[in-house]
Image (cartoon, grey):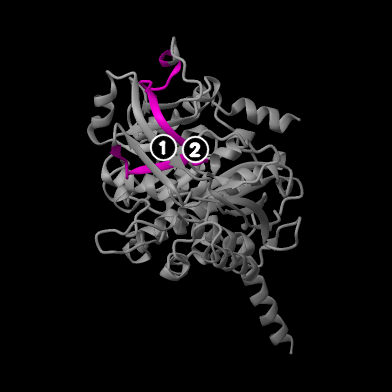
């Protein structure tokens, strides 16, 4: 009897010593596995989910899968609802059913509806250059349609054109214009992406003070600027433009939320947010094989699974700081889920000391992890060390011209002052195998390198553990754009 008791005691002691003797890397390797990674990604990127577009039943299936996965790990639910959901009410605008355009007698068939609204115009339009401040000088456009060229004299690419959209729209409104037709030169791939996004139903957050005076605004495909060149010497252009109102309906979607409490009596009042978006772009223009389902394995079943891996690990081995897991809806529709969340947080934002976001387009270097904003927070060394521990090198954004920091959910937290980089698959430039799969039907689970993903996921989990256990609270790097917002958040 005494021998049996001694053996039991010895086994318990050995088990205790093993647990306490484990390093954070050991704990990471205990929960992260290639088979689990494959299971999550193959489900989320399955044709069954039809690209997980926000507002669809397939998007809700994905949300249910994520919620029940968190539940299975023992992660606690959203403290405000006692479920794993945060309901996000959205407004869906379906494209007008009646659109016809002609310029100088030529029918226009390639267009994108940036701001659809009812209009019926059949007289001369005014060509106004780039539609910027100086172009309005000495010209009256009140009650008239203006035709402009995309971008500016200095920047003519699509990204610049999109960035100037709000400014041009505001100038047209201030000058009393009836609407805008903007001529855009774009290659077939970019134009296909534009058509898919702007001629499909648009979704937005419902606001109390919605602007009802919408100025009709469309892009017209103008290969090699042929139309623009033909109009530069003309002040007035015979134009017909007819468009009906879009159809509106209210839809419901969900952010998926879970919590794991930290182990330190003091540090558990601080939270690390682990976030990713789980939606994708749905069904769109077929590729050369006829495939119409944009599966979104890289973007962002990978990021979503990264957060699930973190949740499983912390549910078993909590860090000193607490963890808040948020899987966002509506990122592809304009960062909607995260925009809604930061205005309706389930826990005070000032308790959130870091947001470790994960979002992806693709990869072209399996020796790297790319951290969008790596040097911008004081947690950079933790991320570098964790990556190195699994044979990877952490690098900063190699394509700053893409503006990636401001194109994912992290930016909404950054704007509130919360340090918020994005952990992404390794790439050396935004081209090649990145653009090959980015928002394309070919972004399927079977095309991924799961040996690389095992290292990638392990590095994220280990980095999260290191940040969560560090006695020093992470901050923005001195002089960062969001440093002042951080000081305002954490000192109030």
Q: Quadrant of residue 318?
A: bottom right
Is 261 placed above or below 213 here?
below
Q: Are marks 1 and 2 in contact (CB under 8 Å)?
A: yes
Give above or below for 152 relative to 329.
above
The one nearer the camera, 58 or 223, is 223
**Sequence-first tag of 1 and 2:** 2
Q: Which residue does the numbered mark 2 point to in the structure image?
A: 119
Residue closest to the far top: 138
Secondary element at image label 1: strand
Number of the label disc, if any, that sits on residue 241: 1
Of residue 192 and residue 79, the one placed in the foreground of this image is: 192
Residue 109 within the magenta-colored segment of the rendering: yes
Q: Which mark is residue 174?
A: none
Q: Is residue 98 magenta?
A: no
Answer above or below: position of 205 versus 2: above
Q: Kindly indicate the quadrant of the structure image that contains residue 398.
A: top left
Q: Which residues are magenta?
A: 106-135
């Amino acid at each position: 009897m005494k021998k049996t008791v001694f053996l039991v005691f010895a086994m318990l002691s050995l088990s205790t010593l093993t647990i306490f003797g484990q390093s954070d890397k050991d704990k990471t390797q205990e929960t992260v596995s290639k088979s689990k990674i494959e299971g999550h990604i193959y489900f989320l990127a399955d044709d069954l989910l039809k690209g997980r577009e926000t507002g669809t039943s397939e998007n809700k299936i994905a949300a249910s899968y994520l919620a029940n996965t968190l539940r299975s790990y023992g992660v606690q639910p959203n403290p405000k609802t006692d479920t794993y959901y945060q309901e996000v009410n959205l407004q869906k605008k379906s494209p007008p059913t009646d659109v016809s355009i002609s310029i100088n007698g030529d029918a226009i068939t390639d267009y994108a509806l940036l701001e659809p609204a009812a209009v019926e115009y059949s007289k001369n339009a005014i060509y106004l250059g780039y539609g910027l401040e100086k172009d309005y000088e000495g010209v009256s456009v009140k009650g008239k349609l203006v035709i402009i060229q995309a971008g500016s004299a200095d920047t003519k690419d699509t990204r610049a054109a999109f960035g100037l959209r709000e400014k041009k729209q505001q100038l047209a409104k201030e000058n009393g214009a009836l609407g805008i037709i903007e001529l855009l030169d774009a290659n077939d791939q970019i134009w296909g992406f534009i058509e898919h996004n702007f001629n499909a139903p648009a979704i937005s957050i419902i606001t109390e003070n919605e602007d009802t005076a919408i100025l009709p605004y469309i892009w017209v495909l103008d290969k090699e600027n042929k139309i623009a060149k033909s109009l530069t010497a003309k002040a007035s252009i015979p134009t017909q433009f007819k468009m009906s109102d879009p159809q509106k309906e209210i839809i419901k979607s969900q952010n998926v939320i879970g919590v794991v409490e930290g182990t330190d009596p003091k540090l558990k009042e601080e939270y690390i947010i682990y976030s990713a978006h789980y939606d994708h772009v749905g069904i769109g223009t077929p590729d050369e094989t006829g495939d119409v389902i944009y599966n979104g394995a890289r973007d962002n079943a990978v990021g979503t699974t990264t957060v699930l891996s973190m949740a499983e690990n912390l549910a078993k081995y909590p860090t000193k700081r607490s963890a808040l897991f948020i899987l966002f809806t509506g990122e592809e529709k304009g960062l909607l889920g995260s925009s809604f969340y930061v205005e309706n947080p389930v826990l005070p934002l000032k308790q959130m000391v870091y947001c470790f976001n994960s979002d992806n387009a693709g990869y072209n270097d399996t020796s790297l992890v790319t951290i969008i904003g790596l040097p911008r927070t004081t947690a950079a060394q933790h991320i570098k060390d964790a990556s190195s521990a699994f044979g990877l090198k952490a690098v900063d954004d190699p394509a700053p011209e893409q503006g990636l920091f401001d194109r994912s959910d992290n930016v909404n937290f950054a704007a509130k002052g919360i340090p918020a980089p994005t952990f992404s698959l390794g790439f050396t430039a935004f081209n090649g195998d990145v653009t090959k799969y980015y928002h394309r039907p070919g972004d399927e689970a079977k095309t991924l390198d799961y040996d690389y993903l095992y290292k990638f996921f392990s590095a994220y989990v280990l980095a999260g553990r290191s940040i969560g256990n560090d006695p020093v609270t992470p901050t923005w790097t001195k002089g960062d754009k969001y440093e002042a917002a951080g000081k305002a958040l954490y000192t109030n």
